[in-house]
Image (spheres, helix red, strand yellow):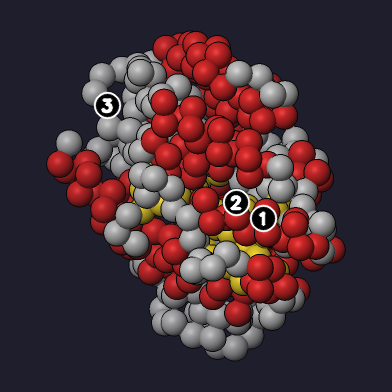
Amino acid sequence: MKTKTKFWIVLLLQIPLALLSCGKRSTAAAGGGAFVYSQKPGSAIIFLSTQLNPVEEAGKMRDSILKSFPGKVDFRPNDNSFIFRQIGSLLKANPSESILVGALHGDLAKLQEEDALQPLDDLARAFANKAFYPSLVRLSKLDGKSIYYIPWMQASFVMIANRKALPYLPAGAALESMTYDQLLQWGKGIYEKTGEKAIGFPAGGKGLMHRFFEGYLYPSYTGSTIVKFRSPEARDMWGYFKSLWQFAHPGSITYSTMSDPLLTGDVWIAWDHTARLAKALSERPNDFVAFPAPLGPKGRGYMAIVSGLAIPRKVKEARDPALLMDYLTQPYIQDLTLKETGFFPALVPAKSADGAPSLLQLGKAVDEQSSSVNSILTLAPIGLGEEGKAYDNWFMYTFSEIVLGGKGVQASLEASAIELQKILDKENAKSWLPDMSEGRPVKIE
């Protein structure tokens, strides 16, 4: 237990350095010319990804990030259940298919547990000249021995506000130390003085609102992400959020990303994934300010997102997917990915330079969020496989029942806990941070 805790402290300390050192390594390839990647694949590559799903991000991936790769890549972003189904069906249809998988650490851990990934130790040695964060490399040793994925990207979720909202801050409140109660007072004050419901959340069909509950509210109020799901502290948390939702913009139930409603002025204060806030900060860096998630009774819950690249075990020829891995982890392409999507590199920057103000803002917010003494690191769910989407949906269903539907809090929590426990039992899931319970499957108290 102590070793596991120490490891995550190391990871926690190193990730903010990646985000703050987000100046460009180079704006072009070595020598000052255009970036050229000369190794050519022998076949088309199917790239299954749970990342860069929104239409705009997927477009950046296809039209910009993959532009210099000298081969055909069929980029297919979708949710995690899609990944688990597609690998087998693609290889059944064509055993010689060339497939690369890009997914979150938790999904890759489940694939490895099912013996579905190739060990990549030889490839990792070939990539020894690349300055991956050591903590991310250790994380990729999914069985504690072999490397099963190559680190690709990292991110988190933060708050952002239009500067016109700042005059309405409650007395004594500061962005870097704001509490959830102060956030409520802020939204209430704006509404009372302007009539605007100015707070926004990505609670639409393709939004990431479930991560707000899993990684932010629950840890901040209960110190847990799942074990304390129906606890008295959780009941208080949902009561709080019902009060906050009174001042949320009605469009929140349709938003998938928050940059557009921020840019139109419909929303003044928002929470979202760093990649989905980059557009607003990039287009109007002087109008917005990024800041860490608020503090709750237990501390400042926040979620670290780590993505990796892996090759399915049954792929017969790994050379072509390995070439795409090499390409995506070139320093120039890592920097381009940061610039185009807001996902931060898995490589240590060669130097800290003049990064875009928007990216520096996001990096600073993540650093403040993760490095404060009362922060509670939370990981995205691990080991749920195809049930990961259903797990996320139960958090959103609970939100719908309690906050939108006005159902009783405790009764709703009890009902949802039963369904969540069924998922944990089915997948024989072990706990993930911040929960540290022993045994499998993890049990909701």
Can residue 419 be seen here? The reply is no
Mark 2: which amino acid?
Answer: Leu
Which residue is painted at 58% across and 59% down in the image? Answer: 159
Which residue is painted at 28% across and 49% down in the image? Answer: 8
Instruction: State yes or no: discs 2 and 3 in contact (Cβ < 8 Å).
Output: no
Q: Which residue is mark 2?
A: 184
Tell which of 16 and 269 is nearer to you.
Answer: 269
Task: Tell which circle, 2 or 3, labels the residue nearer the N-terminal end.
Answer: 2
Cα gap from disc 2 to disc 1, whole angstroms: 5 Å
Number of numbered callouts drawn: 3
Question: Quadrant location of residue 445?
Answer: top left
Which residue is painted at 72% across and 47% down in the image? Answer: 248
Q: Which residue is mark 1?
A: 187
Instruction: State yes or no: discs 2 and 1 in contact (Cβ < 8 Å).
Output: yes
Task: Tell which circle, 3 or 1, labels the residue nearer the N-terminal end.
Answer: 1
Mark 3: which amino acid?
Answer: Ser
Q: Looking at the picture, does residue 440 appear above or below residue 65?
A: above
Q: Residue 275, how many percent across, how many down? A: 62, 58
Q: Looking at the picture, does residue 238 appear above or below residue 406?
A: below
Cα gap from disc 2 to disc 3, whole angstroms: 32 Å
Cα gap from disc 3 to disc 1, whole angstroms: 37 Å
Q: Which residue is mark 3?
A: 437
